[in-house]
Image (cartoon, rainbow, N blue to C red):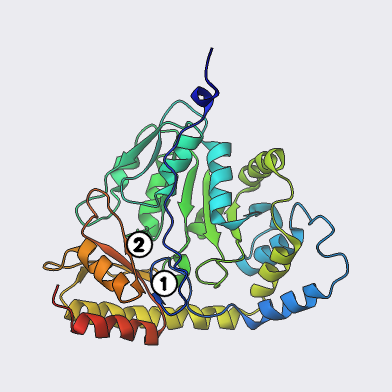
Amino acid sequence: MQNWRDNIRRVTPYTPGEQPAETDVVKLNTNENPYPPAPEVEEALREAACETGLLRRYPDPEAQELVEALASFYGMSPERIFVGVGSDDVLAMSFLTFFNGDRPLLFPDITYSFYEVWAGLFQIPFEKVPLDEGFHLRKEDYFRENGGIIFPNPNAPTGIEESLEDIEEILQHNPSSVVIIDEAYVDFGARSAAELIDRYDNLLVVQTFSKSRSMAGVRIGFAMGQPELIGALKAVKYSFNSYTMSRLTIKAGTAALKNRAYFRETAEKICQTRELAQKRLREFGFILEDSRTNFLFVTHPVWPARKLYEDLKREHIYVRFFPQPRIDNYLRITVGTDEEMSKLYDFLAGYKG
């Protein structure tokens, strides 16, 4: 007889960044925004707490209030917006919806590691395409038959932005494949591919509230694309779980979109801290590319990354270390507040390796 264990689907799960239980830490390891969300979010949640029936009633499965707010913010029709519980939910639905052929899905060898996990979980053939020696994407590597293309821009964990011109060339060479641009970090100085949506019916752009809008704990992600793509995503979502986004989440997300000035000011504050951090880290001997994200991807010619990561952790300073080929001597450092970054600099000033 066959053992029930033989029927278990076995995958290697995604490994998230550490969430330390201690409160007295400098947490620079999960790319969270160090500043609070817009004041309107807290106000909306206070009002929601007093709303009769808020928790006992099902939420709107289409989250229309949030969809319309996003459409207004980005200047497009609601039919071009899809929302989910964080961009991971949106991306997982996209894998299920669009990548069902026999040809391999293409994504970079150094990228968001959840892509490989989803491909394995959903039994999607895939191929990891090597970045060049400077961790840049080679557009020509994607000018061939495939079952779909996905990559972050700016990339994670490298922080490097690819030009919109290169992205458009990839789209031009792949009219028969869905191309997904994962823009989790786009608001920190990069250029969005959303402006290409009108010209390419196979382009899906995915963004999140977790980074620039300081709402990682709320879980809101969204996709932008032409109505046919969005309609296909909705059909899969409603076949999976109609009520994925809570009523509290819908209200918080809608409120966050009201204060454009706060959104811009907070992102700019992080960018200013990032530019100073790049300068300071280079003074300590680190090698790094200019980042267009809220993190820095660094290596040191003398200090091994694993040892530095462990030594920082002992001092309650958390950064991210990736024990995988090509990047196992790099650290990813989230841009925190100026005060948090100063604690990192103070540690490095006395560090002997």
**CA neighbours of label 1 inside 10 A, class few (<14), some (14 to 19), many (20+):** some
Q: Quadrant of the N terminus?
A: top right
In the rendered image, the residue lying farthest to the top is 1
Asked if the residue at tag 1 contacts the one at tag 2, i.e. Cβ–Cβ closer than 8 Å, the answer is: yes
Q: Quadrant of the C terminus?
A: bottom left
Secondary structure under tag 2 reads: loop
Please name the residue shown 80% across and 62% down the image: 55
Q: Which residue type carries mark 1?
A: Gly
Tell whether 22 sits left or right of 345. Answer: right
**CA neighbours of label 2 inside 10 A, class few (<14), some (14 to 19), many (20+):** many
Q: Is residue 308 above or below residue 193?
A: below
Mark 1 or mark 2, which is nearer the start of the sequence? Answer: 2
Percent of width and height locating residue 255 = 69, 74
Disc 1: which residue = 189
| Cα separation between marks 2 and 1 | 9 Å
Q: Which mark is residue 161?
A: 2
Tell whether 95 sits left or right of 141. Answer: right
Tell whether 151 sits left or right of 284. Answer: right
The reply to whether residue 98 is visible in this rendering is: yes
Percent of width and height locating residue 236 = 66, 39
Picture quadrant where residue 316 is located: bottom left
